[in-house]
């Protein structure tokens, strides 16, 4: 019985830390004495070093950094083969195949579009509730195709889910370094 208030208090402390310090991405309750989650601490530290958030995301502003937006805008344009400013299902599949060497199946495309639509709906609700609503917010999809805003939103979703290996894999595969500088190999 006494453990539940303690657990709730501990959870509230963690939430408070995450809200106060935007740069804190994760909290892990561990104990070296009891060997509780010590391996998780080392794994999370390794991941934080391998896939840093700072070049990708402005934690204070809560958005992609300008360098990250530029890089992913370029990537979007590379895969927008018909130059209509939208990524079709075929273009998304070409992107998936280039980055991960795997074919994206139709169900996965539908799931991504549903996730984007859901995310877009949440954002629009926040904007409607906000006094500082931005009337220029752009659609994430047009004619069932993903816009540049939608593509950047996908990257933002991965970062917010702390799945930094995804944007970094895309960037490294397409020739970017850890500071988001593009390195084009000599032919």
Image (spheres, grey):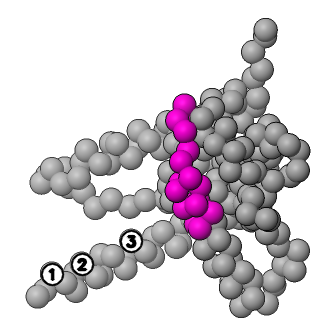
Q: Residues within 10 Å of mark 2 (few under 14, many from 20)?
A: few
Q: Nearer the viewer, residue 70 or 46?
A: 70
Q: Which residue is mark 2?
A: 7
Identify the image quadrant of residue 180: top right
Q: Residue at 22% across / 86% down in the picture?
A: 5
Q: Which residue is mark 3?
A: 14
Q: Earlier in the sequence, mark 2 or mark 3?
A: 2
Identify the image quadrant of residue 179: top right
What secondary structure is marked by label 1? helix
Residue 18 image offset from top left, x and y in percent:
48, 69
Q: Main secondary structure of the magenta part?
A: helix
What secondary structure is marked by label 2? helix
Identify the image quadrant of residue 75: top right
Q: Which residue is mark 1?
A: 3
Residue 129 vertical placement versus 154 (above, below):
below
Residue 89 image offset from top left, x and y in percent:
68, 50
What secondary structure is marked by label 3? helix
Magenta region: which residues? 100-115
Q: Earlier in the sequence, mark 1 or mark 3?
A: 1
- How far apart are labels 1 and 3 at the CA level? 16 Å
Disc 1 and disc 2 in contact, CB within 8 angstroms: yes
Q: Residue at 82% across / 39% down in the picture?
A: 81
Q: How many marks?
A: 3
């Amino acid at each position: 019985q006494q453990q539940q208030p303690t657990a709730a208090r501990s959870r509230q402390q963690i939430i408070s830390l995450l809200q106060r310090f935007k740069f804190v991405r994760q909290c892990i309750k561990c104990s070296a004495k009891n060997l509780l989650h010590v391996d998780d601490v080392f794994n999370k530290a390794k991941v934080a070093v391998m896939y840093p958030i700072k070049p990708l995301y402005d934690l204070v502003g809560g958005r992609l950094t300008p360098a990250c937006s530029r890089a992913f805008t370029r990537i979007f344009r590379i895969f927008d083969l018909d130059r209509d400013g939208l990524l079709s299902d075929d273009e998304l599949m070409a992107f998936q195949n280039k980055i991960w060497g795997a074919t994206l199946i139709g169900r996965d495309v539908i799931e991504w579009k549903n996730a984007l639509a859901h995310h877009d709906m949440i954002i629009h609700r926040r904007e409607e509730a906000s006094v500082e609503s931005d009337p220029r917010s752009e659609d994430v999809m047009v004619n069932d195709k993903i816009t540049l805003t939608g593509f950047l939103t996908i990257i933002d979703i991965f970062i917010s889910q702390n799945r930094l290996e995804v944007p970094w894999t895309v960037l490294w595969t397409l020739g970017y370094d850890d500071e988001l500088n593009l390195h084009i190999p000599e032919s």
